[in-house]
Amino acid sequence: MNAEDSEASKPAEVSERHVDAQLVKRVQNGDEVAFRSLFDRYNRRAYAVAIGVVKNQQDALDVVQDAFIKVHKHIGNFKGNASFYTWLYRIVMNLAIDHVRKARKITDFDDGIHKDDAAGDGALLPRIAESNPGKTVARREMTEKIQAALETLPEYHRAVILLREVEGLSYEEMAEVLEVPKGTIMSRLFHARRKMQDELSEYLGGDLTIAE
């Protein structure tokens, strides 16, 4: 993105944040229609984050539902210091990671998290999957390889990959979501990308570039 494109995108970002702020105020005043509007605006994006962590459609739906229940319950405490979607993603990510940790305590990880239940149609990391247009492999096969590579990452590395590659959050926004310093985010993302590249390099013949 050049400087002109970056400047052009700023009004849209400001407008989106303004709309969210107005909806939040209405919800805080008891407007359930406004809450539904927030849900409609962000439930799909919240699901994309959840499915990337829990890897099961129903579990991801449960995480999103629990996240919005939590949002509804605590929105009166939301002060607007961060954007609404940053606050929401923080809740979704925490619930998703908690879900995975609880599942591991109940059963073996490989039995408890079924990759066959993951979302289809290339839902995970589309930007990575599309970074190799010259490859003739099927998109589904590529997605499965990415899914398998993601499963090798610890939760904190998987989280930064999802927030950056799927959601396109900035380092500052990721730091807010995960409640860690920006430097920690940059370090985790660097190591997570290297691990993903190592896992996928044999499949792609060493030809893998993950966008900054």
Image (cartoon, helix red, strand yellow):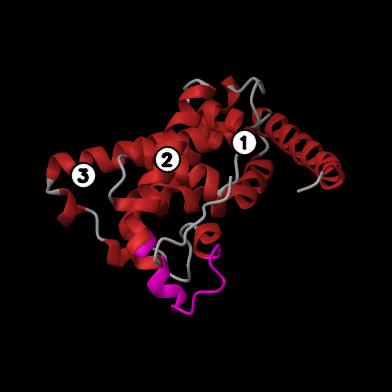
- Compared to 70, does 77 lie above or below? above
Identify the residue at horizontal 29%, vertical 62% (top origin): 115
Q: Closer to the camera, 103 or 110?
A: 110
Q: Residue 193, percent across and down? A: 43, 45
Q: Residue 38, percent across and down? A: 64, 44
Residue that numbered label 2 is attached to = 159
Dot 3 alpha-carbon crowd within 10 angstroms: few under 14, some 14 to 19, many 20 or more: some
Identify the residue at horizontal 52%, vertical 38% (top origin): 89
Q: Closer to the camera, 166 or 201?
A: 201
Q: What residue type is labelled 2?
A: Ala
- SS of the residue at dot 3? helix
Q: What stretch is highlighted in magenta?
A: 130-146
Identify the residue at horizontal 42%, vertical 48% (top origin): 50
3 or 1: tag closer to the N-terminus = 3
Residue sitting at the far left: 107
Dot 2 alpha-carbon crowd within 10 angstroms: few under 14, some 14 to 19, many 20 or more: many
Rendered image: mark on residue 170? 1
Residue that numbered label 3 is attached to = 103
